[in-house]
Amino acid sequence: MRNTELFERAQLTTPGGVNSPVRAFRSVGGTPRFITRAEGAYFWDAEQKRYIDYIGSWGPAIVGHAHPEVVKAVQAAAALGLSFGAPTEGEVLMAEEICKLVPSIEQVRLVSSGTEATMSALRLARGATGRDKIIKFEGCYHGHADALLVKAGSGLLTLGNPSSSGVPADFTKHTLVLDYNNTQQLEDTFKAIGDQIACVIVEPVAGNMNLIKATPEFLQTMRRLCTEHGTVLIFDEVMCGFRVALGGAQALYNIKPDLTALGKVIGGGLPVAAFGGRADLMAHMAPLGGVYQAGTLSGNPVAVAAGLTTLKLIQADGFYENLSAQTNKLAQGLSAAAQQAGVTFCADSIGGMFGMYFAKQVPATYAAMMETDKEKFNRFFHLMLDNGVYLAPSAYEAGFVSAQHDDAIIQATLDVAKQAFAQLKL
Ligand code: PLP
């Protein structure tokens, strides 16, 4: 009952009882679990119930929760002071590490959230090109800056609202929304108004309309069109960066964007995000250039300590091979269990991210994603939750596996899933 008690109290002082909408279980129904602690692949709620966690803080917890080395680094940094508002060596090391690991990033600036990273990249693209129009794709979420909060997937989809109220039409009139994976539409748009477009922003692996991978052709065409028209190509790798591969989706697809937004994994669970890319573009940023952007807690020393340690851990030999293999094992196992039970279902994975779809085929488009059976997902979610497996509380979110999800944990998950699929069939 402690979860219920806390949720009732929370709703008195916080809208909907949560500090980020999807946590509220509005889509799946029921009471959100209040988490008291986490370790490795597990967390525990306020009633001491243990769950195998497949959210991983919505992406950051790639090395597992409370990794001893990350915790030690954070404690050591905290003991030296929490924030200075002046530069530190840690920020230099962090920037060097990001530039070394992400193929297209020559210079980078640290911020505190993915929203800030994409918002700033957008401003930079507009400042550098002197153009206003931007292209985004339906179902891609790029944080909650006004201009990007249009048909933005994720929590908005979960609440049944493609876009947010409170955003003046004037602020989004320059935002063109196209279909994900529709190469022809992109070609046509560039043909018509390519020279007016400041930037194209895309999740190269979309994780906010469940998991949908871009086709190589879609991204290659986007790269070519942006180059031809002097448009800045922004990869939003806040979710897929350091999640699908060490150098992010751009390393996997072998495509260099002009700018990249990062977040989640690079903070290892504390607020660090970043945007970076071509040095000539980054030179437009204040204090060098005229594009303004700033942050009291940007490059915070404690957060950077968590990020740097996480970036070190994910460079261990075989880290991504192992993570991908475990995630693939989970996706394949779920598909097999569903098939055995006669439930229409499929799953997909890339690196440490996975998607589950109550549909015959893995969707490649937003429209196909919307056709999946949300009610079945909701029932499946609760059956898994009751039996100690915590999935994202929405049919439109991707799932995350950490390096601590070993064979026994994956098998335990599949055992629970077998029962859940059997129940679904009843
Ligand atoms: N971009 C993508 C692709 C995301 O998935 C998210 C968050 O889920 C964001 C941007 C926004 O990041 P934040 O929640 O840190 O503001």
Image (tube, rainbow, N blue to C red):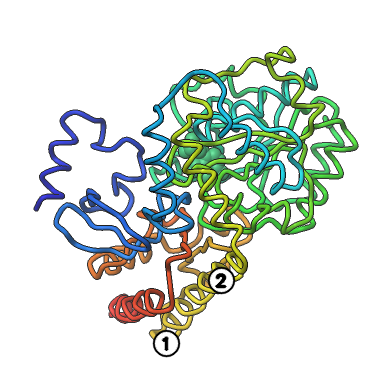
Q: Which numbered dot is residue 316? A: none
Q: Could you tell me which residue is drawn at 78 percent across and 27 percent down? A: 281
As drawn, which residue projects farthest toward the bottom? 340
Q: Residues within 10 Å of mark 1 (few under 14, many from 20)?
A: few
Q: Is residue 354 left or right of residue 124?
A: left
Above or below, 140 relative to 279: below
User: Would you identify the image quadrant in which residue 15 lies?
Assistant: top left
Q: Residue furthest right?
A: 228
149 relative to 224, above or below: above
- Give amino acid for label 2: Asn
Between residue 339 and residue 125, name the one nearer to us: 125
Tell me: residue 63, above or below residue 180.
below
**Which image quarter is the C terminus in?**
bottom left
| Residue at disc 1, secondary structure | helix
Mark nearer the viewer, 1 or 2: 2
The x and y percentages for residue 43 are 29, 58
Callout 2: few (<14), some (14-19), or many (20+) C-alpha neighbours within 10 Å? some
Name the residue nearer the viewer: 108 or 244: 108
Give the residue number, with chain letter if any, for mark 1.
340
What residue is disc 2 on?
Answer: 322
Percent position of residue 362, x then y: 58, 67
Q: Residue at x 66, y 42 (%)?
A: 98
Q: Nearer the viewer, residue 199 or 327?
A: 327
